[in-house]
Amino acid sequence: MWYSDTLAVKDSLQASGNGSSDTGWIMHHVLDARELDLTPFGVIHLPHIELFGMDLSITKHVVFMWIAILVLVLAFISARKAYKKSLVPRGVTNFLEVLIVFVRDEIARPTIGHGFEKFLPYLLTVFFFILTCNFLGLIPYGSTATSNISVTATLATISFFVIQIGGVMKNGFFGYFKGLIPHGIPLWLLPIMFVVEILGLFTKPFALAIRLFANMTAGHIVIMALLGLIFILRTYFVVPVSISFALFIFLLEILVALIQAYIFTMLSSLFIGMAYHQEH
């Protein structure tokens, strides 16, 4: 990762002028793009697609989401074949089983309670997808799809619908929305509380989207800024400091990748449990 990132920083600064204080080059490597930058091997331009006036172009983040899906499909197919040969998991199969049991016993069961099995497939899917996308951003020439607000907003929107559907399934349509209003409040306060509770339904997925997006973006910006100091200041004295701090942030990013997948899944599960068991 260090070699590719350092070359990318150097080329960006040279393109914008040596010693320039412009920070646009940082966002260039964090934001989505219609090309894959494989410096020094070249650049792969991705196809531009329009359908009925809508831009459906394949972008860098789309490519890495496809890669994440492919990795997960191959990993779980391999795990299924391994279980057919032996009931004792080994290697990747053992790692996947540990994560599955963790999501089931430490996230879904405690936060949803009775009936958590209905939502476990979704929670496992979103956990593994976010985790894989996060880790793909840490490999050389990789890109973090979860640092794209469109991706995190889509994941949060799916969670929003799962939450509402779960609440309606358990309590009925009118019963679910009636249960949003606390018992025993004065009649004149009912219209205000109803609006507040409806807004609360939308603030939950908003918080999910912003939290994941901000945390996955911040680390990459800090790493690129630290590496950029080497070429901005143009002195070898800053190299050990920049590399040391960038390495520390990179190791921290590995932990953040795990934590953010856990937090998104845990909060989604918690919100599902609150909607599913309104009586608690």
Image (tube, rainbow, N blue to C red):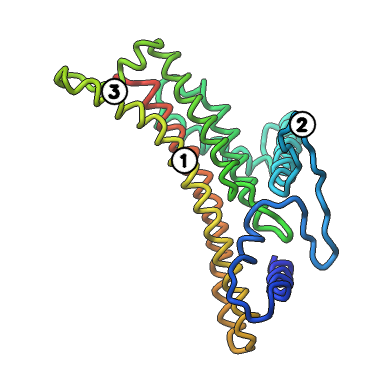
Q: Residues within 10 Å of mark 2 (few under 14, many from 20)?
A: few
Q: Secondary structure at mark 3?
A: helix
Q: Is 95 on the left or on the right of 161, as rendered? A: right
Q: Secondary structure at mark 2?
A: strand
Mark 3: which amino acid?
Phe
> Which dot, 3 or 1, sits closer to the camera?
3
> Which dot, 2 or 3, sits closer to the camera?
2
Q: Quadrant of residue 238?
A: bottom right
As measured in the structure, the alpha-carbon distance from the residue carrying label 2 to the one carrying label 1 is 30 Å
- The label number, if any, that marks residue 161 in the structure image: none
- The label number, if any, that marks residue 194 in the structure image: 3
- The label number, if any, that marks residue 208 in the structure image: 1
Nearest the camera: 206 or 223? 206
Q: Is 239 on the left or on the right of 55, as rendered? A: left
Q: Are marks 2 and 1 in contact (CB under 8 Å)?
A: no
Q: Is 239 on the left or on the right of 76, as rendered? A: left
Q: Quadrant of residue 275?
A: top left
Mark 1: which amino acid?
Leu
Q: Quadrant of residue 171?
A: top left
**Residue for point 82% across, 68% down:** 40
> Which dot, 2 or 1, sits closer to the camera?
2
From what the image shows, is residue 34 above or below residue 205?
Answer: below
Q: Earlier in the sequence, mark 2 or mark 1?
A: 2
Residue at which label 2 appears: 51
Residue 190: give x, y in percent of width and height: 22, 20
